[in-house]
Image: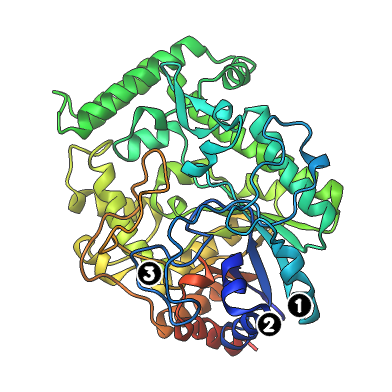
Amino acid sequence: MSDPLVAMQIGAISFLDEGVEETLDILAGQGAVNALFLATPTWTRGTGGRQVPGYELPDHGVQEYDLGWRGGNYATPHPEHYGNTALGHAGRAEEHPDLDLFDLVLPAAKQRGMKSYAWMEESSSAKHLRTYPNFAKTLEVDAWGRPGARPCFNNPDYRNWHLGFVEDYASNYELDGLAWCSERAGPLNALMQGPVQVQDIGCFCQHCKAFARNRGINVERAVEGYRAAVDWNHKVGKGERPRDGAFVTFWRLLLTYPELLAWQTVWTESQRNLYRDIYGVAKACAPEIQVGWHVYHNISFSPFYRADQDYAEMAKFSDFVKVVIYNNCAGPRYHTWIGNICNALFADASPDEVYPLMLKLLQIDEGAYESLPQSGFSAEYVRRETERAVEGVAGQSKIYPGIDIDIPVGQPKERLEPSPHVGTINWDATQGELTQCTPESVRDATAAAFAGGAQGVVLSRKYSEMRLANLAGAGDAIRSLA
């Protein structure tokens, strides 16, 4: 294969801690990296800051946690691009208010022939975003008319704020691409896959109601249905079992309120419309810029979310898709996900009974449920999911699988700072001795992605949590392709 893209997700702190040239030397030498996904804006530990506090520090960089990290925009805001939003150009990273990550890194990267992408994390659950002036006015509205946990895709101030970032970056920096990340499942999916908080389920704001009415949806019936579904979720999550069973009772809600499904479609279309607008604005500013999306891990875990995320549809407004296929952390994560759905839609069955069914529905072949936290998923999982994505886009966009390198697993042994999130965050509840990356596992996963037809890979989640020997495993796989 000639010149596959090998991208590293990396935040500003790594260059500040270790030096620009020194870091680029390591990335190219150890990981055969030829592209950078530069994390800005970001307000989440998954892409920004040093190692997540409480997890083992890697073998490079400053050997201490950056407690209290908040994140933000690590580029220079140009106010003229944010005139159509009440949020303005708010969001400059407080830790480094004078830093411009693009100005710092792009010249050195270009000199080495490395491509540079803006790695744009929506960070919808970040608490710190709520401190920005007017941000509370962009939040979703729950079925009782109260502010929700996350911002609304149909809120014009929120949409235009993100489009401002896109226009700003594409117009003022010589970037090769933009990679935009949104990790949300939508209201119906959330209700089915585990216990929720009321504020997690939306949106029923004036903008979403207008969007739905234009599609002939009965808004009042949708609100009534979601109130009933939230009540179902809470009762089942507390251990109550309806006489006809949790699944039958939920299915009865769908039959009584078909608007439940319709509203999930409204939510998905709203997210997709923002993707289209991001694509259009970026191309209008810089026609050659590459635009793509991070599709989060739920696409491997949930048949319901997978149905939402149609690769063929996505390919119509994508130059590339970064599909999350993190095989090592998939074991603990999926163990938790199965446990969660057995406290909601499949509460009538045990995890050991539900897990084999999910594997069949998702066309995944992995080990026993009880051993997942220790074994992770296989490299074959990476190959299969890559192949499925490649077939889905049918040559209309490129597929860059995300490769797991030392993504933290399980709960930290010590909680060193309060949770930075709002709403329900229940990725991984496992504890004890858990699966860990090795150079061999990273090598095999990387090779499997290319065996599945990938045109590149994205080394994930972020350099500041990776061990160098495991990064070198990716480099070994890349060099073997030559």
Instruction: Name the one closer to the observer, 400 or 123.
Output: 123
Alpha carbons under labels 3 and 2: distance apart: 30 Å
Alpha carbons under labels 2 and 1: distance apart: 7 Å
Residue 240 occupies which quadrant of the picture? top left
User: Label 1 near label 3: C-beta < 8 Å?
Assistant: no
Q: Amino acid at mark 3?
A: Asn
Residue drawn where x is 62% and y is 16% of the image: 210
* 10 Å crowding of disc 2: few (<14), some (14-19), many (20+): some
x, y percent for residue 445: 46, 75
Identify the image quadrant of the N terminus: bottom right
Callout 2: helix, strand or loop? helix
x, y percent for residue 214: 64, 16
> Which residue lies under the disc numbered 3?
328
User: Label 2 near label 3: C-beta < 8 Å?
Assistant: no
x, y percent for residue 11: 59, 65
Residue 196 occupies which quadrant of the picture? top left
Q: Residue 10: in sight, yes or no? A: no
> Which residue lies under the disc numbered 1?
108
Q: Amino acid at mark 1?
A: Ala
- Identify the disc placed on residue 77: none
Q: Is residue 240 left or right of residue 97?
A: left
For residue 32, above or below residue 364: below
For residue 208, above or below residue 465: above
- Identify the disc placed on residue 21: 2
Count of numbered badges drawn on the protein: 3
x, y percent for residue 110: 79, 75
Q: Amino acid at mark 2?
A: Glu
Tell me which label, 3 or 2, sits earlier in the chain. Answer: 2
Q: Is residue 376 left or right of residue 460?
A: left
